[in-house]
Amino acid sequence: MQRRILSAQLARSGYQVIEAGSVEEALSICARTEPDMVISDWMMPGLTGIDFCREFRAMERAGYGYFILLTSKSDATDVARGLEMGADDFLSKPVNGDELRARLSAGDRILRMERELQEKNRLLRAAKEAIDRDLVEARKLQQSLVRERFRSFGTASVSLMLRPSGHVGGDLVGFFPIHAGRVALFGIDVSGHGITSALMTARLAGYLSGASPEQNIALIRTGPDSYEARPPAELASFLNTMMLQEMRTDTYFTLIYADVDLATGQVELLQAGHPHPAVLRRDGRVDYIGDGGLPIGLIEGARYETRRLTLAPGERLMLMSDGFTEAEGAGAGLLGEDGLAAIMERSARLRGPAFLDALTWDIDAHSGGELADDISAVLLEFDGPAG
C-alpha cells in the first residue's frame, strides 16, 4: 500500500514510475531499463535495501543512477553504512510529499550535470581524436623537412637521423652544399616540446634551406649563381639578433654548425649550447670536442667562437642532440657521454644510416623504448680524396 501511494504521488508530479515487489524483481527491471532514480525501502523481505544498493552500483550502466533509501533508522552508523554502499540520499518514513519532491529535484540536478559532463567528455574525446589526426599529419610534414637522409659527395658522405619523442618535436638536422668543394652541416634543438617547438623548426628549416640558396641566411651571394658561406660565428650572431629583435618569442634554441672542406677534411665548427660533437677515430675510439657556447635567442649581444679541426681519412664527425646523452634507463641513470661513446665504439664497423640505426636501437634498449626527448644526429664520414 505504501508503495502504491508513493507511486501515485510521483506520477502526479510527472515521473514515469515502475514498481517492484522485491529486490530480485527490481534488479531485473534495472538491468532492462536503467532507471534514472531508484527509491527503495531499507527493510524488505529477503534482500534489504542495502543489498539492493550494492548490487545496483555494481551494474553496468550508460549513466549515473540516483539512489534514495527510505528508512526509519536514524542512527549515524546506519546512515554511514548506507552511504558506503552507494546511497545518495535518505528519507525518513512516513514520507512527506514536499520533501520527496525536493529530494528528487536535487537528484535531477545531479543527473543533468552528469549528462552534461558526459557530453562535454564526448566532445573532448572527439576534439582529441581530431588533434591526434592533425598531429600525425604534422609529424609527416616535419619529417619531410629532412628530405634527403643520405648523400655521397665522393670524398665524404652525410647521413641524417631525426626522431621526435612525441608526435612532433623541436629537433632539426640538415645539410646544404656551399659550393662544389664544401658542405655545411647543422643540428638544432628548440626549447620545449610539441607544436610551438615544431613550428620554430619549420621556420628555421626555411632559413637554412639547401633547395633555396637565395633564401639561406648562411650563404652570401658572390655572383649570379655562386655563393660563399657566412662565417659560422657571424651566422650564430645573426640568428641570435633575429630571434631577439624580430621574432620576439620566449623560445630559444641550441645550434651546432659545421663548415666542411670536402678535399682536406678541415672543419670550422660553431657550438651554441648544443652537446659536444663526437669524432669517431679510425681505431674506433671516440673523442668529444667543443667548448659549449650560449644558446641562440637567449642573451642579447651573445658572442660566439668558431673552433677548427681537421678530419683524417676514415674519421667520422657526429653532431647530435642531447636526447642521446640524456636518455634515461630504468635504474641505470642517464646514458651520458661515456655511455654514448661505448655504443658508438660497438657500432664502429657500420657506416652511414646503418650506423645511426644501430645507435637508435641501443638508445631504445637503454631507455626501454620510452624516450623523454627528441633524438637527432648528423653523421659526416670523411674518406679523403681517391688514391
Image (cartoon, grey):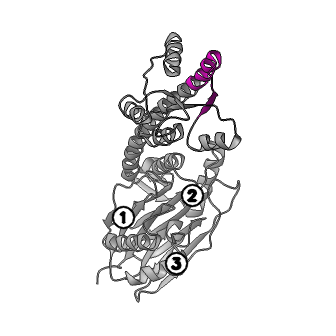
Q: CA distance from mark 2 to mark 3?
A: 19 Å
Number of the front mark, 2 or 1? 2
State the residue position of label 3: 309
Q: Residues within 10 Å of mark 2 (few under 14, many from 20)?
A: some
Residue 235's disc number: 2
- Does the magenta run of residues contain 70? no
Compared to residue 185, the image places residue 107 above or below, namely above
**Type of amino acid under label 3:** Leu
Cα distance between the residues tagged 1 and 3: 20 Å
- Residue 147 placement, left or right of 253: left
Of residues 132 and 113, the one drawn nearer to the viewer in this rendering? 113
Q: Which residue is mark 1?
A: 180
Q: Position of residue 99 (x, y in %)?
A: 65, 19
Between 330 and 313, the one lying in front of the other is 330
Q: Quadrant of the C terminus?
A: bottom left
Q: Which secondary structure, mark 2? A: helix
Question: Reading the chain from its start, which is encountered first: label 2 or label 1?
Answer: 1
Neighbours of disc 3 within 10 Å: few (<14), some (14-19), many (20+): few
Up the image or down, 139 lies above or below 375; here it is: above
- The structure residue drawn at horizontal position 41% and vertical position 73%, both measured from the top left corner, is 365
Residue 122: name its quadrant. top left
Residue closest to the eye, 17 or 348: 17
Q: How many labels sit on residues?
A: 3
Q: Secondary structure at mark 3?
A: strand
Say few, some or many: other residues with alpha carbon within 10 Å of mark 1 (under 14 / 14 to 19 / 20 or more).
few
Task: Identify which amino acid the numbered label 2 is placed on.
Answer: Leu
Residue located at (36% from left, 64% from top): 180
Displayed quadrant of residue 358: bottom left
The amino acid type found where label 1 is placed reads: Ala
The magenta segment is 88-108
